[in-house]
Image: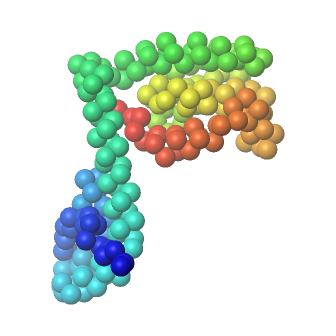
Amino acid sequence: MEKERGYNMQIPEIQITKSWRKSISMSFDTQGVLQVRAPKFMLSGQIDNFLLKNSAWIDKNFQKITQRIKNKKKYLLWRELQNLETISDLEQYFKQEAKKYIIPRCNELAQKYWFTHAWIRITSAATRWGSCSSKKTLNFSYRLVMSPVECIDYVIIHELCHLRQMNHSTKFWKEVFSIMPSYKIYENHLKNEGWKYTL
Ligand SMILES: [Zn+2]
């Protein structure tokens, strides 16, 4: 017998706000509530039709947002366990941690794979994990220190490889691959989970 579907599915909370607007739109807020913005005189049946028509989009994005919320909760719990909430200046704390870990690790990997670099700086960059200047200075965001150590290695190796290839050419990726064959996992992790490593 075919299993009945749909009953276990979680349904998002829906909040409808009507205002003087021409068309209906919706998005999930950070709490996972579906915020529907509808024109003032739209009938509830029309709103229902709109929701029904977009049910696939709603399901997909609701799953995504609930997963994010779960992850964020896990991360916050982890932070609590680390007793980090007692540290008044978290940014300063992570910057120090980053300096303590990333700089020596970068020097170690540079030596191991014959790279010559100039300064290593820990920055507050929000959107990039690392960068490499034409003067061979390497920059790493302090946020990186919150990510798994393999991800830190990946970003270090990525930036070190830019010392030889100042681009993202096939040659560059070959170089990264030769040092860290599994780099894709960590690149993807940072792409998908990187948002967690913020304060
Ligand atoms: Zn790059």
Q: In this picture, is 117 found above or below 57?
A: above
Along the line of sight, the residue nearer the viewer: 164 or 53: 53
- Image quarter for residue 8? bottom left
Relative to residue 6, is residue 198 drawn left or right?
Answer: right
What percent of the width, then of the height, locates residue 29?
28, 57
- Image quarter for residue 48? bottom left
Q: How many labels sit on residues?
A: 0
| Residue ID at (21%, 87%) | 45
Pick out the residue farthest to the front.
1
Pick out the residue farthest to the right.
171
The quadrant of the image that shows the N terminus is bottom left
Residue 174 visible, this orientation: yes
Q: In this picture, is 26 found above or below 90?
A: below
- Image quarter for residue 199? top left
| Residue ID at (18%, 74%) | 18
What percent of the width, then of the height, locates residue 186?
57, 38
Q: In this picture, is 85 found above or below 62?
A: above
| Residue ID at (48%, 19%) | 98
What percent of the width, then of the height, locates residue 187?
59, 40
Residue 115 visible, this orientation: no
Relative to residue 150, is residue 44 drawn left or right?
Answer: left
What percent of the width, then of the height, locates residue 122?
52, 21
Relative to residue 150, is residue 33 drawn left or right?
Answer: left
The colouring scheme, among rainbow, by chain, secondary structure or one colour, is: rainbow
